[in-house]
Image: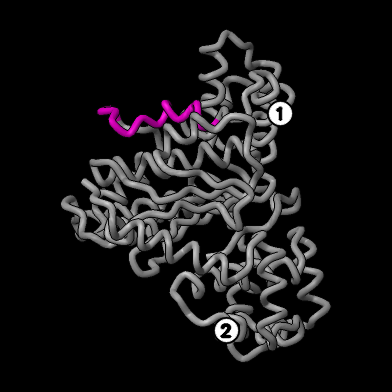
Amino acid sequence: MYAVGRSSTKLHRTASNKLLWPVLEGLGYLGKDVRPLLEAAGLDEDRAFAPDARVDLEALYEIWRRAVEVTGEPALGVHLAAFLDPSANVSWPMPLSLLEHVGLVSATLQEAVGTQSRFLRLLSDGMRAGVEVEGERAIFRLEQSPEAPPPLTEHVFAMAVNLARRVLRRELPLIEVWFTHPAPPRVQAHAKLFKAPVRFSAPCNAVIARAEDFTARLPTANEMLRARIVRQAERLLDTLPSIVLFEDKVCAQIEAELPAGNTNASAVAEKLGVSSRTLHRRLQHEDASYQDLLDRVRLRLAVRHLAAGRPIAEVAMLVGFAQASTFHRAFKSWTGQTPADYQVRSRQQSVALSRQAWP
């Protein structure tokens, strides 16, 4: 699973208008007139609140940005998490209700996330999710465009955590929550919602939790019903315009080439059946660069291998560095910490986790 490219008018990405509803209803509750915000984004109230409408991704981002300006609250996305109350008896609106039902009938929460990721386009183009289990820890990543405003990113994470709580029908204990953006002036609301330490300016957007919460069998698992719901979700997905990102193919090929030490664009281009010039041109069309993708894949794999306890020299080789010293400098530039520091921190988290008595 890889981060997606930046928004581009050439790709014309859209999102469900349901991602507008919390912020618009929150502004209405505060007595704010939402019409100027909608007009600035090229929308009107009919489209914003239509049952099954989609809006341009840039319009969605613009409204969230302006809402923060209007309210003066950088943590707006977390404060609006009440819209996603996991204890509510009423069903959430589509497509959230569909994602919830996919989760309920899946064998495990890890399987649920894998299946839900296939259908996140129903919520927004350019959104990906995945879970990596590393010993006693599970790392849940939810990626969207780097241009997404931080309050929207935080709100989407709140939605994901509360969705998991609804699927589990109990609390989901978290070890740590990571956001790539800088910390807002106040983080009390974050601590209250996630009930875990929140790290900002982190290497990636992620939630770190117990592995067993993602791998234990769900009591509501039903393979026959799951297959039926997946078929329905696929039909809904087929109604959306097709968007195939070339950078996803490039990232997958980069990962395949790294163990052999092949990090240059020409080797990847050859395996993809295109010229090096074409590869760079197509990535530029998606507002991406080969070096950014290479670093992104290297970081994702390095974090996984380091957390698994592999020797640093071996990790350097696995992610395509000829020398451990070069890997050391690159990893520190990506994360602000050395590979050894990251490994120690991961080990300390695992030890602390094993000593905790969770409900």
Q: Secondary structure at mark 2?
A: helix
Residue 160 image offset from top left, x and y in percent: 42, 44
Q: Name the residue nearer the viewer: 99 or 195.
A: 195
**Residue 185 visible in rendering:** yes
Q: Name the residue nearer the viewer: 293 or 17.
A: 293
Q: Which mark is residue 243?
A: none
**Classed neighbour count for the residue bearing mark 2: other residues with Cα under 10 Å, few (<14), some (14–19), many (≥20):** many
Q: Residue at x 59, y 71 (%)?
A: 339
Residue 267 image offset from top left, x and y in percent: 72, 87
**Residue 50 visible in rendering:** no
Q: What segment carries the magenta color?
A: 77-90
Q: Is residue 285 rendered to the left or right of residue 74?
A: right
Q: Residue at x 66, y 69 (%)?
A: 331
Q: Is residue 286 rendered to the left or right of residue 164?
A: right
Q: Is residue 266 magenta?
A: no
**Classed neighbour count for the residue bearing mark 1: other residues with Cα under 10 Å, few (<14), some (14–19), many (≥20):** some
Q: Secondary structure at mark 1?
A: loop
Q: Name the residue nearer the viewer: 232 or 118.
A: 118
Q: Given the image, on which type of amino acid does mark 1 rest? A: Ala
Q: Is residue 251 rendered to the left or right of residue 166?
A: right
Q: Which mark is residue 41?
A: 1
Q: Given the image, on which type of amino acid does mark 2 rest? A: Leu
Q: Which mark is residue 318?
A: 2
In the figure, residue 73 lies in which quadrant?
A: top right
Measured in 3D between alpha carbons, the distance from the residue under mark 1 to the one under mark 2, in whole angstroms, is 45 Å
- First of labels 1, 2 by sequence position: 1
Q: How many marks?
A: 2
Residue 37 image offset from top left, x and y in percent: 68, 21
